[in-house]
Amino acid sequence: LFRSLKNIRPVWDRDGRRFAYTRDDQLFVGSLADTGRVRIAGDTTPRSDTTAAARSRRARERFTPVSWVPAGASQGPALVATNPDGVWLIDPASRQRTLVVASSDSVPSTPRVRFAGALNQGAALLLVMESRTSWNRGLLRFDRATGRLDTLSQDTRLVGSITTSDDGSTAIIAGGPGNRPADLWALHGDFRAWQRLTEANPQLAQRALGATELLSYLD
């Protein structure tokens, strides 16, 4: 498949048959059934063009593959990828791109966002958002059919690692209040209610701990 993996980090789908990778700022997809690779994103402006406009265009066309999403009820498989403007869903067949959530380091009003998993057999995406300006974070759900983005929860709880079941009907979260050790929680149904699975440190429930907040500072 690859003579060398230098500067290449393939992202495989769950079945291990399809992969995506970035090389020379170009986003490619391929499969074990075909030796050919298809470029689905990336600017083709010659590297010799060092104008500001060309550099900006190359940066916005530089996508990093994150994860494959299985085919939903009415959609084919898709690729979750990020670029300086946010998190995107890319159809490898049509190369159509859909902006899931805007997220940019240069725009403090946009949150930091990371993909957490596919829900309901690939019909929706689960994402974690973190505010850049306040001690606020939460869970988002993106419906692939309607393009609707819903906020499932938004508060001060920390959200760590997330694992989704194969069919996307359940998500297991490691998280909890910012000033206490994380526990495991389960999400089902509409994924809005956190169901506690563990309480690793019950002795801390009666102890007063310091508050957690975001500090403002001048860099």
Image: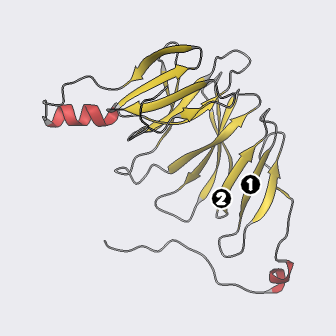
Residue 143 percent coordinates (x, y): 66, 29
* On screen, residue 62 above or below 75: below
Q: Label 2 vs label 1: CA separation?
A: 7 Å
Residue 211 appearing in the image:
yes
Residue 91 appearing in the image:
no
Residue ID for mark 1: 173
Residue at the location (64% across, 84% down)?
210
Q: Is residue 23 left or right of residue 31?
A: left
| Pick the front one: 8 or 41 | 8
* On screen, residue 210 above or below 199: below
Decide: few, some or many residues near mark 1? Use Cα within 10 Å; few <14, some 14-19, many ≥20. many
Colour mapping: secondary structure
Q: Earlier in the sequence, mark 2 or mark 1?
A: 2
Q: Type of residue at label 1?
A: Ile
Q: Type of residue at label 2?
A: Gly
Q: Is residue 39 left or right of residue 175?
A: left
Residue ID for mark 2: 160
- Which of the 4 image quarters holds residue 160? bottom right
Residue 35 percent coordinates (x, y): 50, 15
| Pick the front one: 53 or 210 | 53
* On screen, residue 43 above or below 10: above
Residue 113 percent coordinates (x, y): 53, 47
> Is label 1 in a helix, a strand or a loop?
strand
Residue at the location (32% across, 73% down)?
218
Residue at the location (68% across, 31% down)?
14
The quadrant in which the C terminus is found is bottom left
Q: Which mark is residue 30?
A: none
> Is label 2 in a helix, a strand or a loop?
strand
Contact flag, marks 2 and 1 (Cβ < 8 Å): yes
| Pick the front one: 144 or 121 | 121
Q: Is residue 214 left or right of residue 71?
A: left
Residue at the location (63% across, 21% down)?
77
